[in-house]
Amino acid sequence: MSTDLLLTADQRIAIAHEMIARYNAQDADAYVELMTPDACEAGYRGAVVREGREGTRAGLKAMFAQYPQNRVTILDSKGVGETVVLHEAVSRAPDGEQFEVLAIYSFEGDKVSRVEFIR
């Protein structure tokens, strides 16, 4: 996809859902392909926890090694403008930690430039 492509909310939601599919497959390389080179993941309005594609790739690989059964279920999806919000249920393992987050995906063209988490 071209970065100057104007996407609909549904198309952005589909990209965010594809990111979750790649996350659930624990494929950090494929996950970061959907991000801008300088993208980051952060707490909502807070500190960056994974910086750039390489930082995100390394952080995810470490987390996947720590939680090999980690999975996300999408409970709800909304898209407005350049932003997608997913209500996600996270399971570290079938009998492990369970929690919910709101994940806010900011887009630049057809790539995600920032993901912020509210937990």
Image: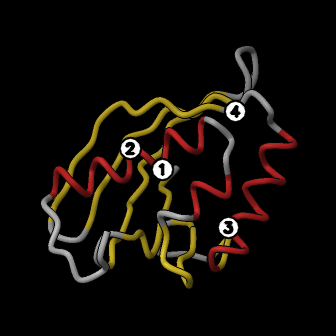
Can you tell which of label 4 and label 2 is closer to the viewer? 2
Position of residue 92 measured from the top left corner of the image (x, y, whole percent): 71, 31
Q: Residue at x 37, y 41 (%)?
A: 87
Tell me the SS state at disc 1: helix
Q: Looking at the image, is mark 4 or mark 2 earlier in the sequence?
A: 2
- Residue farthest to the top, as pictured: 95
Would you say the residues marked 1 and 2 are in contact, meaning their CB atoms lie under 8 Å apart? yes
Nearest the eye: 80 or 45: 80
Residues under labels 2 and 3: Cα distance?
17 Å
Q: Looking at the image, is mark 1 or mark 3 earlier in the sequence?
A: 1
Which amino acid, mark 4? Asn
Q: Is residue 13 left or right of residue 68?
A: left
Q: Which residue is mark 1?
A: 19
Which amino acid, mark 1? Met
- Quadrant housing the N terminus: bottom left
Tell me if residue 76 comes above or below residue 101 in the rendering: above
Q: Which residue is mark 4?
A: 70
Nearest the eye: 1 or 99: 1
Q: Quick one: label 4, few (<14), some, or many (20+) residues within 10 Å? A: many
